[in-house]
Image (cartoon, rainbow, N blue to C red):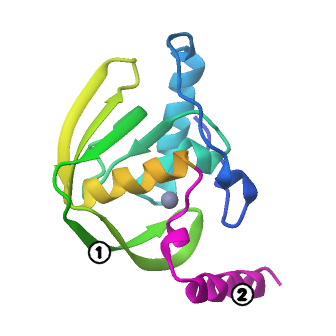
Amino acid sequence: MSLLTILEYPDPRLRTKAEPLTEKDFTPALQQQIDDMFETMYAAPGIGLAGTQVDYHNQLIVMDVSEDKNQPRVLINPEYTPLEPTCELMQEGCLSVPEYYADVERYVRIQVKALDRHGQPQEFECDGLLAHCVQHECDHLKGIVFVDYLSRLKQDRLRKKLIKQKA
Ligand code: ZN
């Protein structure tokens, strides 16, 4: 296994829209990609990582929101629908925006449909941290980063801070 490089905001590659995986893509190389993404996510450490963040532009997400880091979850070609219109604010961070946290509004309860790492369909309902994480990671596959939801002012401040850090 190997650690992958995580793209950092505002890298334009984070804006790439990921392609769905097809039957022929379920190869040993895909299993390797999944294992490498888990290793990269756990090492960071983080609770979720989308392919987009490691410059892999297929619809693949790995996550583990458990405290003991023993509930790995793979979502391939994920889709979600809200189970109720209620939204809630929760503080989010992102491995692609290091050391930055902000409140983001997400659906409280969602139903998720995706394939697992072997291409088998899976379906589940979730709320809380897992629901937020699924919505955050699905955004990455569409080229959306959580800071896009912040006000212009906050985004400008963040960009200035990042430029200062790089200088
Ligand atoms: Zn993220």
- In magenta stretch: residue 151: yes
Report helix, strand or loop for mark 1: strand
Numbered-mark total: 2
Q: Is residue 40 visible?
A: no
Which residue does the numbered mark 1 point to in the structure image? 89
Disc marking residue 63: none
Q: Residue at x 38, y 46 (%)?
A: 63
Query: Mark 2: is the Cβ under 8 angstroms from ligand 1?
Result: no
Q: Residues within 10 Å of mark 1 (few under 14, many from 20)?
A: few
The residue most toward the right is 167
Relative to residue 91, is residue 110 drawn left or right?
left
Q: Which residues are magenta?
A: 143-167
Q: Quadrant of residue 56?
A: top right
Q: Is mark 2 in CB contact (under 8 Å) with mark 1?
A: no
Q: Amino acid at mark 2?
A: Lys
Relative to residue 32, is residue 86 drawn left or right?
left
Q: Position of residue 67 (x, y in %)?
A: 25, 58
Disc marking residue 160: 2
Name the chief secondary structure element in magenta: helix
Figure check: 23 above or below 102: above
Report helix, strand or loop for mark 2: helix
Query: Mark 1: is the Cβ under 8 angstroms from ligand 1?
Result: no
Q: Position of residue 116 (x, y in %)?
A: 35, 26
